[in-house]
Amino acid sequence: MTITFNDLGLSQPVLQALDMKGYNTPTPIQEQAIPPVLAGRDLLGIAQTGTGKTAAFMLPSIDRLRAAENQIPFKSCRMLVLAPTRELAGQIAQSAKDYGALAGLKVHSIVGGTSVNKDRNKLHRGTDILVATPGRLLDLIDQKAFNLNGIEILVLDEADQMLDLGFIHALRRIHQLAPADRQTLFFSATMPKTIKELVGQYCNNPVQVSVTPAATTAERIEQYLFMVQQDEKQSLIEMILQGRHQVPGKLERVLVFTRTKHGADRVVKKLAQVGIAANAIHGNKSQPQRERALDEFKRAKTPILVATDVAARGIDIPGVSHVINYELPNVPEQYVHRIGRTARAGKDGVAIAFCAEDERAYLKDIQRNTDATFERLPLPERFRAVVEGVGPTKRAQSQPMKRVNPRPVGGEAAQRKPKPKHKHPARAGKPNRGTSHGAPGQGEGQQRRGNQRRSNQKRFAR
Ligand code: AMP
């Protein structure tokens, strides 16, 4: 028999809000977590993103807050949700507003990178639900602008990631400041030793719910692998995004991971040089820049987002069709988190890893520590020649205006085959100056190929 939200004991306002969101069936973690949380138990949820864990803790908490009917405490909150990143905090706060729409609860979020004065003002009268990143929360506590005395429910979301980001001291302090008789809901995708210790401090005899064993990769994600040299990766990603080298699945929204902020910027810049619009999202970007990049990605205005691990933590976007690991992570769990960005909420997804010679050890680690199995994909034909700018495909890339189209993936653009060479001569990534409409003279074509080769030499010489 299929379990419905009605069977889980949730109140009418919450059920109506779920109805408005179009959720019919609870996900496994919701099915298992909602009844004990409604009953007031502490919870340890081992779950990766995409499993519906936000609703699993938010829905019963909303009902408990409603039922308790306590006053909003001055300069404090009744429910505190801690999240590792600004994006995740924003999304949780949005979910709280959506799910609690009819429950009349006040929801706020506070994150770093925004005005601390505004946060102080908005929290002066307190709130029912506060979603916060640990750093900003402690800033306000230190300024005596906020306290944790009113907390009835405390949630730690993505606790393993908070530790990776160096929040261990913050979490220990928050634990000491929060009332001991609170309810604690603790979520982590993985269970290393430090997390177990933290669970011991934070939780009181928690009910344990595990929807996937620690560090396993989501089942619905098809995982592919290119063995490729470092200096070939950029050409490979360009060819994939331009639809010139087919990969499984239809490219709709592509999330690309690099290890460093600088690496993310470099990929975006080079994609722009061949007319592919993409945004980067990482810790050096301002909050408005990050929000704009996410928004454009969500609306598929710029359906390619190049991210670092930290920045991508909070990304919850339905319809990420492909995750490309441009560089492999050196921590296997990170691989699980990355590919968990696709195949969310029952959808299928494709993950593609680019592995260079010097990343073989990372690949082995991933295979050993997760259940990842990869199907190896072939590189494009005569690929080395393409990379060096002397192969036929590289020249074909120089087709002008189509490549400047800022929507290179998704439906049509991705499926479009390169036009025959003689019809559209090259000026890749540059505005069409008119001359490129006509068939080029022989000399002109050679000149361009020379330029292309020189710019490639410069590019790969770095
Ligand atoms: P989460 O793991 O909490 O980040 O949720 C992943 C995605 O699943 C989000 O886009 C949610 O809005 C969506 N979601 C959560 N619960 C359900 C449900 N019961 N039915 C359909 N979608 C859901």
Image (cartoon, rainbow, N blue to C red):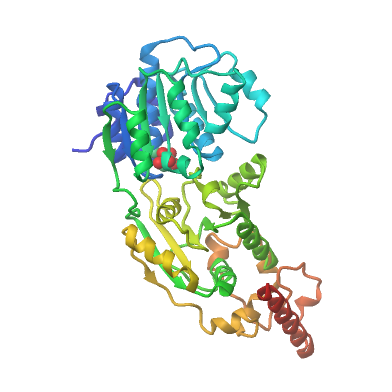
The answer to whether residue 108 is seen in the rendering is yes
Quarter of the figure with residue 269: bottom right
Please state the horizontal and vertical placement of residue 443, each as a whole percent of the image: 79, 89
> Image height check: is 420 above or below 365?
below
Please state the horizontal and vertical placement of residue 236, each as a whole percent of the image: 55, 72
> Foreground: 103 or 369?
369
Question: Which quarter of the rendered image does ligand 1 occupy?
Answer: top left
Residue plotted at (56% across, 61% down) = 409
Left or right position of 288 against 442: left
> Foreground: 108 or 245?
108
Q: Quadrant of the N terminus?
A: top left
Left or right position of 251 against 33: right
Quarter of the figure with residue 423: bottom right
> Image height check: is 128 above or below 314?
above
Report the number of numbered marks: 0
Quarter of the figure with residue 223: bottom left
> Image height check: is 238 above or below 48?
below
Q: Quadrant of the C terminus?
A: bottom right
The answer to whether residue 439 is seen in the rendering is no
> Foreground: 204 or 412?
204
Please state the horizontal and vertical placement of residue 249, each as a whole percent of the image: 43, 63
Please state the horizontal and vertical placement of residue 213, each as a whole percent of the image: 29, 48
Hey, which residue is sitting farthest left in the picture? 1
Residue plotted at (31% across, 38% down) = 29
Residue plotted at (64% across, 75% down) = 397
> Image height check: is 134 above or below 374?
above
